[in-house]
Amino acid sequence: MNNIELSTIYLPMLDEKYKAEAKTSVLDGDETVAKKGGNGEIKIAKLDISALGDFDRKSGYTKGNTTLTWETVKYDKERSQDLRIDRLDNAESLGLPFAKLSGEFMRLHVAPETDAARIAKIAGTAGIGKKEETLDTGDAVIKALRACTNEMDENEVVEGNRILFITPTLLGMLDDMESYKSKGVLNRFSQVIKVPQTRMYTKIDLKDGKTEYGFVKAADGKEINFLCVEKSAVVSAMEQFVKYFSPDQDQDGDSHVFKYRNYNLYAHCYENKLAGIYCSCKAGE
C-alpha cells in the first residue's frame, strides 16, 4: 500500500477524533452554508431578505431584495505538527499506534486550541451581547442565564437552536441546586455543553512553534463564564491534512512520520445575527 493510500485511511481517523474531542465542532457548517475551496479560502452562504412593504392594487407587490450570495473568506489560521512513531515501537499494524497517537494529539492539543480560538473569536466580535459579572453562587448563575435568554427573546432570536457553552464549575453550581430552580433556565437551551475554563477566554495568543507551542490566555483576555450561540448566527470549519512517510523515507531518523496540517476558520459571525450571540465573562481581571 502506498503513502497516498495510507494517508487516505488515516485522515478519517483524525476527523472522527476531532468531532469527538472538540466541544465547538457542533458549530461546523455543512455544504449548504460553507463550501471549502482552494488557496486557503472558504465560501460562506449569506442570505439577505427585505422586510414587508404595502401591496398596491395597481402596481402589485413590493419589490424588495432577496439575495443568497457566497462570501469568500480566508481561513483564520494554518497550524501544523510533525508526528513520529519509531520503527521499533510500531506494532504489526500501523493503524493501532497511529490511532493512539492521533487520539492523544487531538485530545491534548488540536481540540483544546481549536475550541479556545473559536470561542475567543466569537466572544471578541463587536456587536454581540456581552456582560462582565462575578458568578459565585448557583442563584447568580441562574440570574445571568435568565438575562441572556431574556435578551435573546426580546430580540426574537430563534429559540430552538441556542447552544450554551458553560464551564464545569458553573454547571456544577446549578447541579447542586434544587432541580426545579436550574431546570427551568437550562431548558431554554437546545444543548448545554461543558467546556473547561482553560478553553474559555475572550482572547488568546497562539504560539508559533519556534520556541513555544500551543496557546495561552492573552494578557488582556478575560475568563468566560458562559457563551450562548444560536447555531445559525455562527459558522466554523476546519480542513485537516496528513502526509505519511515510512522509516526508510525519514531523512531525520528512523520513524513513521505523519505530517499534520489544518486550515481553520475559527468562526464567521453573521453581522445580521449578532443578537444570537451572548457572552458572560468574569469581571475585574
Image: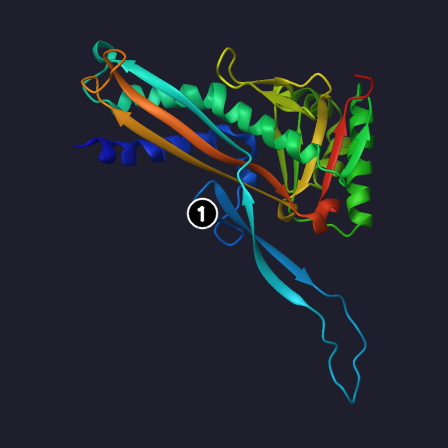
Residue position marked by numbered label 1 in the rendering: 37
| Quadrant where the C terminus is found in the figure | top right
Expressed as whole percent of the image width and height from the top left, the position of residue 59 reads: 76, 86
Q: In this view, does 67 lie above or below 12?
A: below
| Quadrant where the N terminus is found in the figure | top left
Q: Which colour scheme is used?
A: rainbow
Q: In this view, does 9 lie to the left or right of 52?
A: left
Q: Is mark 1 on a helix, strand or loop?
A: loop
Residue at point 56%, 35% (across, down): 76
Q: In this view, does 108 lie to the left or right of 194?
A: left
Residue at point 35%, 19% (across, down): 83
Q: In this view, does 83 lie to the left or right of 115?
A: left
Closer to the camera in the image, 246 or 229: 246
**Residue 158 in sight in this render:** no
**Residue 118 in sight in this render:** yes
Q: Is residue 100 left or right of residue 49?
A: left
Expressed as whole percent of the image width and height from the top left, the position of residue 190 reads: 64, 42
Residue 269 occupies quadrant: top right
Residue at point 68%, 25% (across, down): 203
Q: In this view, does 123 lie above or below 61?
A: above
Residue at point 80%, 50% (across, down): 155
Expressed as whole percent of the image width and height from the top left, the position of residue 46 reads: 61, 55
Residue 251 occupies quadrant: top left
Expressed as whole percent of the image width and height from the top left, the position of residue 26 reads: 55, 39
Closer to the camera in the image, 265 or 233: 265
Looking at the rendered structure, the kind of residue marked 1 is: Gly
Characterize the local packing of mark 1: few (<14), some (14-19) or many (20 or more) Cα atoms within 10 angstroms: few
Q: In this view, does 136 lie above or below 184?
A: above
| Identity of the residue furthest to the bottom in this view | 58
